[in-house]
């Protein structure tokens, strides 16, 4: 398939610049896999489409305040670093701006000495490996000097940093939010559980793949960046129990999909474990685990658009996106949601 097969026209004014006041009051487009029907709802209406015995699978990764600003000690020049993932100990993979001047051996200073780093290596995708030194716990330092790594298409400063976290975020490590989960409130989750729907958390730390555009016309030549995932034995057991009883597995977000499909075997059973995944899901992929998906509206030509097209069909998804533009849905991280069921 070609990259151009996943293009669509998106007016810039439909790119949401801030979250709406109440998380669960965003709009919800419902796309039915077995028909051409499209419904227009509010996110709180999600509960109408869930059945007792289903399971919602959510990514509990928490966004790090991973954008830090500092200087190169040798020249005093300003530098911006976006932390992507911890590779080992005090070493992190990162994106650096300006990249051309970030050389191996350069020493960087952040927060007037609160944090220092030395560039020790390049990565094969244009990033850097930085070894950090700090006196206080690393995450504590980040909380003091770091900012939320909002996507580049969001120009407006975020007043409440917690609006770029899900209410169930637990384990810090992501360079971007698993944004489908931003629509949930504690109250809505309680109502969903009260209906007899199970909720299970898995983990995938969102990394460079979120920021990398597809740069090849033949999409099968695209390589995904590896990201860390984890499924506990308890989570796998619960998901498998639901499937065994005929319930549906509804993934919250594409990161949950990629975690489940990485861990699923050929019979659809989810295996517990952890590791790195670079799974790339595009049309033609045969899903092993999931039955439905809650997701946001994605960028043209993106791997996320390809994933949802694999689940519902490319033509159906592109038609739904054309409808979303006509109906002025809000797009991307702080935008509205879609349920594919």
Image: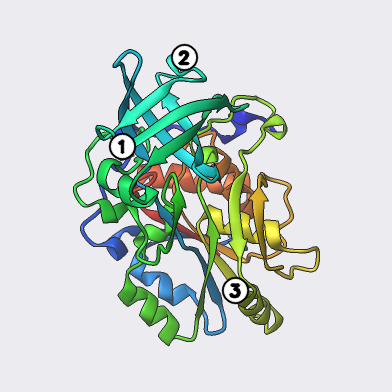
Vertical comparison of 130 with 162: above or below: above
The x and y percentages for residue 96 are 43, 26
Under circle 3, the secondary element is: helix
Residue 273 makes an appearance in the image? yes
Label 3 Cα crowd, 10 Å radius (few <14 / some 14-19 / many 20+): some
Location of mark 1 (residue): 154
Q: Are marks 2 and 1 in contact (CB under 8 Å)?
A: no
Q: Are marks 3 and 1 in contact (CB under 8 Å)?
A: no
Vertical comparison of 216 with 148: above or below: above
Image-quadrant location for residue 165? bottom left
Number of the front mark, 3 or 2 = 2
The x and y percentages for residue 187 are 31, 76
Q: Are marks 3 and 2 in contact (CB under 8 Å)?
A: no
What residue sits 52% from the left and 20% below the top?
104
**Closer to the camera, 7 or 95?**
95
Left or right of 83: which side holds 6? right
Location of mark 2 (residue): 100
Image-quadrant location for residue 153? top left
Q: CA distance from mark 3 to mark 1?
A: 34 Å
Sequence-first tag of 3 and 1: 1
| Residue 91 image label | none
Q: CA distance from mark 2 to mark 1?
A: 25 Å
Under circle 1, the secondary element is: loop
The x and y percentages for residue 159 are 19, 47
Label 2 Cα crowd, 10 Å radius (few <14 / some 14-19 / many 20+): few
Location of mark 3 (residue): 235
Under circle 2, the secondary element is: helix
Sequence-first tag of 2 and 1: 2
Name, please, the residue furthest toward the front.
135
């Amino acid at each position: 398939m070609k990259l151009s097969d996943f293009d669509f026209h998106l007016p810039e004014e439909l790119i949401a610049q801030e979250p709406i006041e109440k998380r669960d009051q965003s709009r919800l487009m419902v796309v039915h896999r077995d028909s051409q029907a499209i419904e227009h709802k509010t996110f709180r209406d999600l509960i109408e489409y869930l059945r007792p015995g289903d399971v919602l699978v959510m990514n509990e990764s928490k966004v790090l305040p991973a954008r830090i600003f500092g200087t190169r000690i040798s020249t005093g020049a300003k530098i911006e670093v976006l932390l992507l993932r911890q590779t080992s100990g005090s070493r992190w993979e990162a994106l650096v701006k300006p990249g051309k001047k970030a050389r191996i051996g350069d020493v960087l200073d952040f927060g007037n000495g609160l944090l220092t780093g030395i560039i020790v290596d390049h990565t094969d995708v244009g990033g850097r490996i930085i070894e950090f030194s700090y006196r206080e716990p690393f995450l504590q330092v980040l909380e003091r000097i770091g900012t939320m790594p909002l996507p580049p298409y969001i120009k407006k400063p975020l007043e409440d940093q917690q609006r770029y976290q899900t209410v169930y975020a637990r384990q810090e490590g992501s360079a971007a939010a698993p944004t489908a989960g931003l629509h949930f409130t504690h109250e809505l989750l309680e109502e969903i559980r009260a209906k007899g729907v199970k909720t299970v958390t898995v983990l995938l730390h969102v990394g460079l793949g979120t920021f990398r555009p597809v740069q090849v016309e033949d999409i099968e030549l695209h390589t995904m960046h590896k990201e860390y995932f984890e499924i506990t034995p308890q989570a796998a057991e619960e998901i498998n129990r639901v499937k065994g009883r005929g319930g549906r597995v509804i993934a919250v977000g594409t990161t949950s999909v990629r975690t489940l499909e990485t861990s699923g075997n050929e019979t659809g059973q989810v295996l517990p474990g952890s590791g790195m995944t670079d799974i790339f899901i595009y049309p033609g992929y045969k899903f092993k685990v999931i039955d439905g998906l809650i997701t946001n509206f994605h960028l043209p030509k993106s791997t996320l658009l390809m994933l949802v097209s694999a689940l519902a069909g490319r033509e159906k998804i592109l038609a739904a996106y054309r409808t979303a533009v006509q109906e002025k849905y809000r797009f991307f991280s702080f935008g509205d949601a879609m349920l594919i069921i």
